[in-house]
Image (spheres, rainbow, N blue to C red):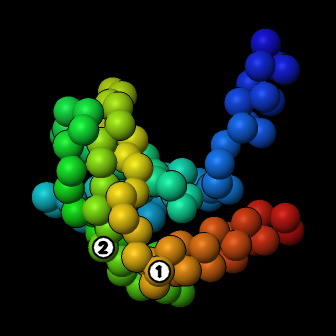
């Protein structure tokens, strides 16, 4: 079992940081597991898979970004999204945030 979990972690495409980050999506939300590919949106509201929306995320030291997000699946406390057509500026700001927070975890 431990090997299976470790294997799934190493197959992840992008490095992620836990958060939480403040977000907006038809009201305030919390964003977790942020990475270049997407994130988890903690909210009592659910969106069906395939729903496209604009998610705003407040990145520490980078400020607010707006990304187009597609809902992948829902869980009890929110849903996972993937970022669609991420522009270069938002991509760079997410990358800098992940790198900065990843480095902080080492200390």
Q: CA distance from mark 1 to mark 2?
A: 12 Å
Q: In this image, 99 relative to 37: left or right?
A: right
In percent of width and height, residue 97 lies at 59, 75
In percent of width and height, residue 70 lies at 30, 48
Q: Secondary structure at mark 2?
A: strand
Q: Residue at x 36, y 77 (%)?
A: 65
Q: In this image, 16 relative to 33: left or right?
A: right
In percent of width and height, residue 102 lies at 73, 66
Indicate the quadrant containing the C terminus: top left, top right, bottom left or bottom right.
bottom right
Seen as rendered, the residue at the extreme top is 1
Residue placed under numbered mark 2 in the picture = 66
Query: Of callouts 1 and 2, which one flags the residue occurring earlier in the amino acid sequence?
Result: 2
Relative to 6, does residue 42 appear above or below in the rendering?
Answer: below
Residue 19 appears in the picture as rendered:
no
Q: Secondary structure at mark 1?
A: helix
Residue placed under numbered mark 1 in the picture = 88
Residue 49 appears in the picture as rendered:
yes
In percent of width and height, residue 6 lies at 80, 30
Q: In this image, 83 relative to 92: left or right?
A: left
Residue 44, quarter of picture:
top left
How many neighbours does mark 2 have within 10 angstroms: few (below 14), some (14-19), or many (20 or more)? Answer: some
Seen as rendered, the residue at the extreme front is 85
Indicate the quadrant containing the N terminus: top left, top right, bottom left or bottom right.
top right
Residue 53, quarter of picture:
bottom left
């Amino acid at each position: 079992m431990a090997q299976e979990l470790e294997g799934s972690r190493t197959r992840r495409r992008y490095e992620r940081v836990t958060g939480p980050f403040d977000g907006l999506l038809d009201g305030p939300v919390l964003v977790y597991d942020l990475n270049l590919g997407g994130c988890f949106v903690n909210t009592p509201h659910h969106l069906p898979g395939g729903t496209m929306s604009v998610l705003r995320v407040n990145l520490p030291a980078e400020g607010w970004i707006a990304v187009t997000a597609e809902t992948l699946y829902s869980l009890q406390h929110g849903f996972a999204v993937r970022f669609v057509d991420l522009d270069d500026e938002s991509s760079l700001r997410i990358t800098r945030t992940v790198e900065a927070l990843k480095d902080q975890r080492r200390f």
